Amino acid sequence: MSRTSKGARLVWRDESRKANGSLRNKAGWFIRDGQSFISACGGTGDRERAEKALAEHITEKYRPARERGRDPHQVGVADVVNVYMQDVVPTHASPSEAASRLVAILGFFGGDMLSDVNGQRCRDYVDQNPKKAAARRQLEDLRAAINHYCAEGYVTTAPKITLPKKPIARHRWLTRQEAARLLLAAWRMRQTWKGEESDRRTGRHVARFMLTGLYTGTRSGAVCGAAMRPTEGQGFVDLARGVFFRRAQDAVETKKRQPAVRLPDRLVAHMRRWATTPLEMKTRGRSKSQIVGRMIAHDYVVEWNGKPVLSIKKAFKSAVEAAGLGWYEMAIGKDGKPKRVFKTDVTPHTLRHTAATWLMQNGTELSLAASYLGMTEQVLRDTYWHHHPDFQAKAAALITAKSPEMRVKSNVVRMP
């Protein structure tokens, strides 16, 4: 059985000579690509020079073909994806996430030609992926890459990508009692050591995230990346005016709109306390225990050990489990023994669903709620309108009426 190729890489080779004693090559770094060895440092032993030579070798070897007017059976899917990664992905709002999805595509379609891509091949890709929603998103990226390659004129025709059906949208939202339980659980979370709780609070930053998400309906990524003052490359909170600028000024605007939002007075008061430094609290006569117990966030809305939190999923799930908003299932662990696993349908995005639901339940107009949440009125009507007090109220009243509603005929002119 043949070994898997390790690809082009740097190796160190000692000085070698021919049978007649003449020098064959000097000691140094070489690029090993299969069975061939290419000098990378010219016998100088310079590692940095060798790494640059390796990068140039890989770039030249895997440079995608850009000849125009080729047939699909002459174009590899890898070429299509590489062109898209060079031309389009750097302009995305999250290039790293798009690149990771395309890497997954190459793991399955990397050896195929463009003519091999059809509906059955797409269905096979979905079947081998346990996460159907992720597979659909990755196929959408492949479709975008093929469309871009075709639009540039590198291929004559483009195959059609068959996408699986969209998953059913989640409608889980929290009642005010459940939200209170969740906040209290995050507030009380403590670090445990050998089964005993310590005095170190581990969920205060999660409580800040929850309050901001519930009161503004902002997506988790925008909340975690928000600063307490104007910061280059990040959204920020204007505590003087009480406005949350969700999107950074130089960020690329996407279909997921992130307009500025007016903060409720209650949340502004919380954030002003969070932004208070320990020195300011000390000058106000607060004790050390009072300072430690506060939800302090000097620079960011969601902060842990002085740094912004990039992902809140793990800590959020711990708070959900502590609040009892889920269930347990039996599963087989890595050691082969059965164990209880916590499952829940409450995720960080549930806070956005909850904010939209509460606005509808309180009778907010569609236009005002859409502007506040940063979503279209059509999405609000399709997903959350049934929570509104006016939802089909007139139709429900008329269905039981004994006579039709009096209407003024438009073709009759009433004389005074």
Image (cartoon, grey):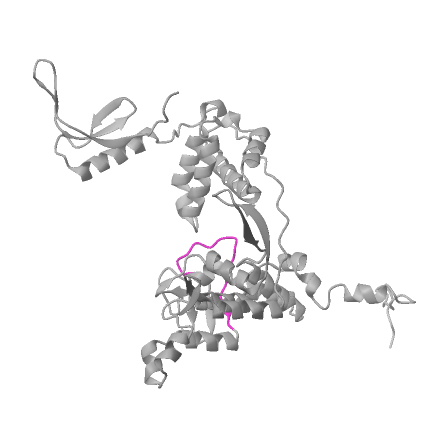
Quarter of the image where one finds residue 193: bottom left
Q: Position of residue 146 (x, y in %)?
A: 49, 35
Identify the residue at the far top of this view: 20
Could you tell me which residue is drawn at 45 percent across and 34 percent down?
A: 106
Q: Position of residue 279 (x, y in %)?
A: 31, 79
Query: From this viewpoint, is residue 287 visible?
Result: yes
Q: Position of residue 116 (x, y in %)?
A: 52, 25
Compare residues 151 and 237 and report the one nearer the observer: 237
Identify the residue at the far bottom of this view: 285
Identify the residue at the far left of this view: 21
Compare residues 324 and 28 and report the one nearer the observer: 324
Quarter of the image where one finds residue 239: bottom left
Could you tell me which residue is drawn at 85 percent across and 67 percent down?
A: 407
> In which quadrant is the N terminus drawn?
top left
Q: Position of residue 285 (x, y in %)?
A: 35, 86
Magenta stretch secondary structure, dominant: loop
Q: Is residue 384 left or right of residue 12?
A: right
Residue 384 vertical placement versus 162 (above, below): below
Q: Which residues are magenta?
A: 248-263
